[in-house]
Amino acid sequence: MIELTNVSKSYDSTRVLEPLDLVIQRGRTTVLIGPSGCGKSTLLRIMVGLETAGGGRVRFDGVELTPANAAEMRRQMGYVLQDGGLFPHLTARENVTLLARYIGESSRKQLDARVRELANLTRVPCQFLDRYPTQLSGGQRQRVAIMRAFMLDPKVVFLDEPMGALDPLVRFDLQEDLRQIFLALGKTVVLVTHDMGEAGFFGDPIILLSDGRIVQQGSLREMIEKPVDPFVTRFIQAQRLPIAV
């Protein structure tokens, strides 16, 4: 679905991504993980077309992603931020349907039917849809943001630490629901997290980055049992994961 070839990125004289190659397989959930500043969010934004690579090439579903076509290509992508990124002056329903209404290709009846479908899928009570973001809990806001990301039935959904600010119980419930949604819809998903336990829960494969380079990719079990670099073991131990799973 997505292919990166020799992609790199620098800000002024600071290199944040070393030249790397990466393939995102269709229909699978790929997790990008690593310490703060390792380049995972920058890599995600390059795939979304919100950042331009300093070098190399990005292909999305066989088409090269460029600054000229990025806005159009993003209509085939869903994107969820850590804090949801909802517009505070719009209701939940208005946030979910914003881009669909802008494009104008669906009737009001079709939009309402799609919103009901997504609300059921994400377990958002319909009465919450007429509330503003400040009237919703953190978990509810994230569920609305997920509805918005799926509204146009995208080919790929990108999530940038979508559960990082949630308390453990809310996070647990949302993780369970998200995995079921991904399985039910069969979507290609790219998820950024700093939590290796969460990466293992979702990811197949996991891409571990450090200092702008890919250190290892594979399953959590492979990283625990067959680390290719001492950094892999240190990173896992720092998160207090068991040495064997």
Image (tube, rainbow, N blue to C red):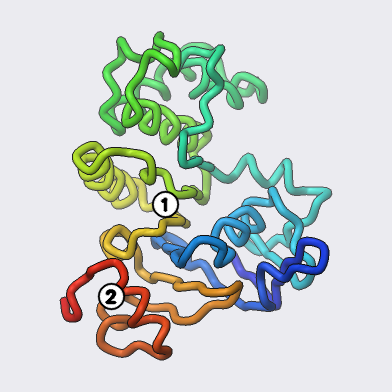
- The residue type indicated by label 2 comes to Gln
Q: Amino acid type of disc 1?
A: Lys
| Quadrant of the frame with the N terminus | bottom right
Residue 193 in the image: above or below residue 82: below
Is tag 2's residue or tag 1's residue first in the polypeptide sequence? 1
Q: According to the image, label 2 marks what residue?
A: 237
| Secondary structure beneath label 2 | helix
Callout 1: helix, strand or loop? Answer: loop
* Left or right of 69, for residue 241: left
Q: Which residue is located at x 53 percent, y 42 percent? A: 79
Taking the image as drawn, is residue 177 in sight? Answer: no
**Residue 77 rendering spot, x and y as whole percentages:** 57, 45
Question: In which quadrant is the C terminus drawn?
Answer: bottom left
- The mark lying in front, picked from 2 and 1, is 2
Asked if residue 162 can be seen in this view, the reply is: yes
Q: Residues within 10 Å of mark 1 (few under 14, many from 20)?
A: some
Q: Residue 73: x, y in percent? A: 68, 47
Left or right: 230 in relation to 171: right
Q: Is residue 41 above or below residue 166?
A: below
Q: Is residue 166 above or below residue 221?
A: above
Name the residue beneath numbered marker 1.
187
